[in-house]
């Protein structure tokens, strides 16, 4: 039900056609999207269908097609809705461009970890919704005010986005592994401990770095690692901006 295939002539993004007027008082795009996010948070992408959303809304699946043509459109709308949770207002008042970018990056990280279903989508889908575009424009404004040339802006924006998404992909995978370990039985824990011991013997530097904290999946550790990586990228961008001969 509600797969991702579009018919010939349909726009490839829900944002390329105007929102239809409300025909049923029980339904609106906003209400549909709110339920879609709830389903995705609870059951992931595999649990999402037109029928599932319709059941939660108390309507027939066919009535949803007035507002969304496919499951893909529901996901696209939901993705932009959760990106709207990224608060850029505080960053817009910051004079320090590095702190402004870090603040928004940290907000993106928090939203992605709160809605983990969105993580793979950010690497496979273009985001054309108003919240995504607003965040991108904000980042470009910060970079422009910081003195980055116009011909650098797109590349710098891409580098920042790639670091944030890549860092959260790794963190999310590690967290899911830790959560699975927390559900393990005694035998599985013993096997995991033995595996960790072998890692320590074969790769001592890796083991020392990865397990330097106890437990290694503490929130403050991940936050510090994220800030460190983002700061390194900002250092590189700043050096690149200040040395035009290296371009």
Image: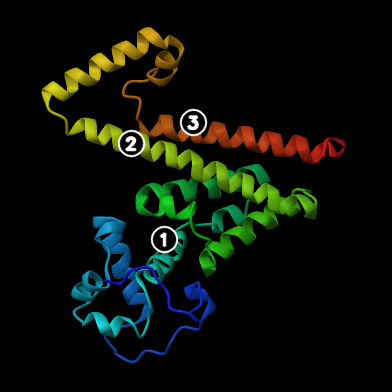
**Image location of residue 192, percent across then percent down:** 23, 21
What residue is shown with label 3?
A: 225
Q: CA distance from mark 1 to mark 2?
A: 21 Å
**Quick one: SS at disc 1?**
helix
Can you name the residue that lies furthest to the bottom here? 23
Number of disc labels:
3
Can you name the residue that lies furthest to the top here? 201
Can you name the residue that lies furthest to the right here? 245
What residue is shown with label 2?
A: 175
* CB under 8 Å between discs 3 and 2: no
Q: CA distance from mark 3 to mark 2?
A: 14 Å
The residue positioned 46% from the left and 60% from the top of the image is: 83
Instruction: Give the number of the mark in front: 3 or 2.
Output: 2
- Is residue 13 visible in the rendered structure shown here? yes
The residue positioned 47% from the left and 79% from the top of the image is: 8
* CB under 8 Å between discs 1 and 2: no
- Mark 2 residue crowding within 10 angstroms, few (<14) / some (14–19) / many (20+): some
What residue is shown with label 1?
A: 82
Viewed as shown, does residue 110 lie left or right of 137? left
Q: Which mark is residue 39?
A: none
**Quadrant position of the N terminus in the picture:** bottom left
């Amino acid at each position: 039900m509600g797969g991702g295939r579009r018919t010939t002539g349909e726009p490839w993004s829900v944002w390329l056609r105007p929102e239809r007027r409300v025909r049923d008082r029980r339904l609106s795009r906003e209400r549909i999207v709110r339920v879609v996010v709830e389903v995705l948070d609870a059951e992931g992408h595999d649990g999402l269908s037109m029928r599932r959303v319709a059941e939660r809304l108390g309507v027939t699946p066919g009535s949803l097609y007035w507002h969304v043509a496919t499951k893909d459109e529901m996901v696209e709308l939901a993705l932009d809705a959760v990106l709207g949770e990224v608060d850029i207002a505080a960053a817009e008042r910051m004079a320090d461009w590095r702190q402004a970018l870090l603040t928004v990056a940290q907000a993106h990280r928090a939203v992605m970890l709160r809605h983990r279903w969105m993580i793979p989508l950010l690497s496979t889908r273009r985001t054309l919704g108003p919240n995504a575009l607003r965040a991108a424009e904000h980042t470009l404004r910060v970079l422009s005010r910081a003195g980055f040339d116009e011909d650098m802006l797109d590349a710098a924006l891409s580098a920042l986005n790639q670091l944030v998404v890549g860092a959260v992909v790794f963190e999310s995978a590690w967290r899911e592994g830790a959560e699975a370990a927390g559900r393990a039985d005694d035998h599985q824990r013993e096997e995991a401990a033995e595996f960790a011991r072998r890692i320590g013997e074969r790769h001592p530097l890796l083991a020392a770095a990865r397990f330097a904290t106890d437990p290694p999946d503490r929130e403050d550790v991940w936050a510090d690692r994220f800030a460190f990586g983002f700061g390194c990228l900002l250092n590189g961008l700043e050096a690149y901006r200040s040395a035009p001969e290296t371009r």
